[in-house]
Image (cartoon, rainbow, N blue to C red):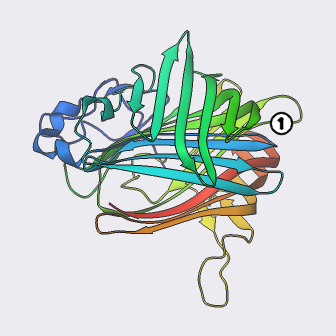
């Protein structure tokens, strides 16, 4: 598959369509939101962070879907393979503070409401993340404090069209982020040691009913190398570029196709707790994912429906990039299938 490398310039034409589709290693396209015109009120924007280590993990979502904003925190305890998720929804978020930054490397998020605070600031080449939420499961409150820094200037960037000319998805995955800090749940303080993670930065307008497949890995191998990948498919027209990329220390390698092969139960439905094969036709991607648990979330409301299966587990196998074979061994990450109607 021949993939198109994006050129520097504006993301959108004056009519709101993509100037070009393809991939890059940085946000070379300027997200010119005003070009959406009358479709501006259909835009969807999010910042999603996930940091994992052998003891615990945190996942943070800040999103604005135009007619609602969603703020979510998940804490994971890998010692017992349990998690807690709390989500708040704000209908018709009109205030300026709910508009997310046009670039992942600058601009702050400062959302303070009665029951939650989501603050993400750029300070001295770091991101300082503070999340405070009331009524976190059976606890009165939770507070997350993280300092995040980048270890590579390479990232996965893709500009993806959909069927309608004004629909698009502009996405960046910043892998191999380093986060550390603490979480206070009720009166219990928990250390979040040095953890590798990912920022999923997404902006665009796309079809209301969609399904995507995504997996992310960020870990330190036995030799002390930072190793990660972004693998996924199913979202938009990816004929000009896939979202698949492998990261090794400061380098990034573009990959072609990928597929997830799920096992099914006796009723013909996917069993998310059985081994999942992750592979490419060329065998450049040859992985087996062994699940630990499934973070399942399902919502069926008037204006939004979701069926999310985010499975945490371990990857084993190999990835071959530019003639080099890299071994992935007992690496903690996640793989998901998500169906959204919103």
Residue, far right: 222
User: Residue at left 29%, top 69%?
Assistant: 302
Residue topped by disc 1: 221
Q: Quadrant of residue 60?
A: top right
Question: Quarter of the image containing the C terminus?
Answer: bottom left
Q: Quadrant of residue 95?
A: top left
Picture mark count: 1
User: Residue at left 65%, top 72%?
Assistant: 262
Question: x%, y% of residue 123?
Answer: 52, 13
Question: x%, y% of residue 37?
Answer: 12, 39
Determine whether 241 is above or below 306 in the image: above
In the image, taking residue 33 as reference, residue 321 lies left or right, namely right
Question: x%, y% of residue 337?
Answer: 54, 63
Q: Is residue 159 visible?
A: no
Closest to the observer, 332 or 246: 332
In the image, taking residue 284 as reference, residue 337 lies left or right, namely left
Q: Is residue 65 visible?
A: yes
In the image, taking residue 314 as reference, residue 270 lies left or right, namely left
Q: Quadrant of residue 199?
A: top right
């Amino acid at each position: 598959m021949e993939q198109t490398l994006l050129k520097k310039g504006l993301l959108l034409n004056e009519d709101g369509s993509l100037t070009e589709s393809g991939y890059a290693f940085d946000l070379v396209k300027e997200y010119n939101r005003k070009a959406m015109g009358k479709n501006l009120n259909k835009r969807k924007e999010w910042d999603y962070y996930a940091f994992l280590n052998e003891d615990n993990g945190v996942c943070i979502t800040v999103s604005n879907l135009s007619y609602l904003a969603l703020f979510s925190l998940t804490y994971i305890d890998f010692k017992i393979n349990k998690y807690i998720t709390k989500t708040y929804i704000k209908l018709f978020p009109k205030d300026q503070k709910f508009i997310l930054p046009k670039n992942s490397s600058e601009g702050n998020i400062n959302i303070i409401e009665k029951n939650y605070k989501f603050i993400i600031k750029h300070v001295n080449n770091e991101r300082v993340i503070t999340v405070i939420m009331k009524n976190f499961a059976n606890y009165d409150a939770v507070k997350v404090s993280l300092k995040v820094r980048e270890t590579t200037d390479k990232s996965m960037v893709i500009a993806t069209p959909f069927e309608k000319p004004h629909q698009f998805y502009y996405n960046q995955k910043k892998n191999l982020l380093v986060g550390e800090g603490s979480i206070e749940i009720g009166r219990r303080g928990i250390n979040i040691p040095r953890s590798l993670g990912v920022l999923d930065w997404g902006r665009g307008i796309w079809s209301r009913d969609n399904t995507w497949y995504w997996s992310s890995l960020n870990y330190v191998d036995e030799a002390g190398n930072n190793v990660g990948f972004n693998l996924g498919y199913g979202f938009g027209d990816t004929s000009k570029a896939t979202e698949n990329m492998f990261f090794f220390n400061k380098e990034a390698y573009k990959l072609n196709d990928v597929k997830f092969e799920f096992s099914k139960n006796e009723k013909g439905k996917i069993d998310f707790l059985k081994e999942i094969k992750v592979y490419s036709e060329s065998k450049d991607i040859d992985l087996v994912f062994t699940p630990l648990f499934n973070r399942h979330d399902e919502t069926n409301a008037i204006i939004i429906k979701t069926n999310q299966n985010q499975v945490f587990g371990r990857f084993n196998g190999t990835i071959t990039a530019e003639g080099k074979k890299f071994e992935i061994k007992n690496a903690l990450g996640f793989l998901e299938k998500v169906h959204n109607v919103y």
